[in-house]
Image (cartoon, rainbow, N blue to C red):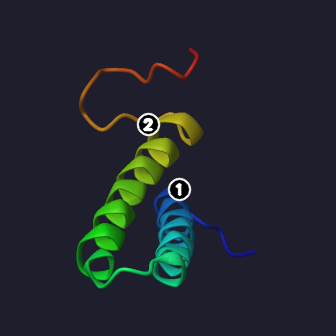
């Protein structure tokens, strides 16, 4: 069976979340300035939050900011 690593799983989850958010954003937005500024900025914020969620909460990894995850039990 094909084994999916944590890194690839994190990439897949990020891709699905960010693409779905961007598609909904482009469908719902009515103002032209929002296409250039609003949707890209909010999509970037969603990417950062999703990446943090996948890294720390789901996988219990740290990004070098602390020695241990606050969610991971010993």
- Residue at mark 2: 61
For disc 1, the neighbor class at 10 Å (few under 14, some 14 to 19, many from 20) is few
Q: Secondary structure at mark 2?
A: loop
Q: Secondary structure at mark 1?
A: helix
On the picture, is 43 further left or further right than 33? right
Tell me the CA gap for discs 1 and 2.
10 Å
Q: Between residue 26 and residue 11, name the one nearer to us.
A: 26
Q: Earlier in the sequence, mark 1 or mark 2?
A: 1
Circles 1 and 2: CB distance less than 8 Å?
yes
- Count up the numbered dots: 2
For disc 2, the neighbor class at 10 Å (few under 14, some 14 to 19, many from 20) is some
Quarter holding residue 52: top left
Work out whether 1 lies above or below 71: below
Work out whether 28 lies above or below 9: below
Q: Between residue 40 and residue 18, name the one nearer to us.
A: 40
Please report the residue visible at 28 percent of the width from the left and 22 percent of the height from the top.
Answer: 66
Work out whether 10 lies above or below 33: above
- x and y percentages locating residue 18 in the rendered image: 47, 69
- Residue at mark 1: 6
Please report the residue visible at 48 percent of the width from the left and 74 percent of the height from the top.
Answer: 25
On the picture, is 48 further left or further right than 18? left
- x and y percentages locating residue 54 in the rendered image: 51, 48
Which quarter shows the N terminus? bottom right
- x and y percentages locating residue 10 in the rendered image: 50, 59
Residue 22, numbered label: none
Please report the residue visible at 49 percent of the width from the left and 43 percent of the height from the top.
Answer: 53
- x and y percentages locating residue 44 in the rendered image: 32, 62
Please report the residue visible at 61 percent of the width from the left and 67 percent of the height from the top.
Answer: 4
Residue at the far front: name it.
31
């Amino acid at each position: 069976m094909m084994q999916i690593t944590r890194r690839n799983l994190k990439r897949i989850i990020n891709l699905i979340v960010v693409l779905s958010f961007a598609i909904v954003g482009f469908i719902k937005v009515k103002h032209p300035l929002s296409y250039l500024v609003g949707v890209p900025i909010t999509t970037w914020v969603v990417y950062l939050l999703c990446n943090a969620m996948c890294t720390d909460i789901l996988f219990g990894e740290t990004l070098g900011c602390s020695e241990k995850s606050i969610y991971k039990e010993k």
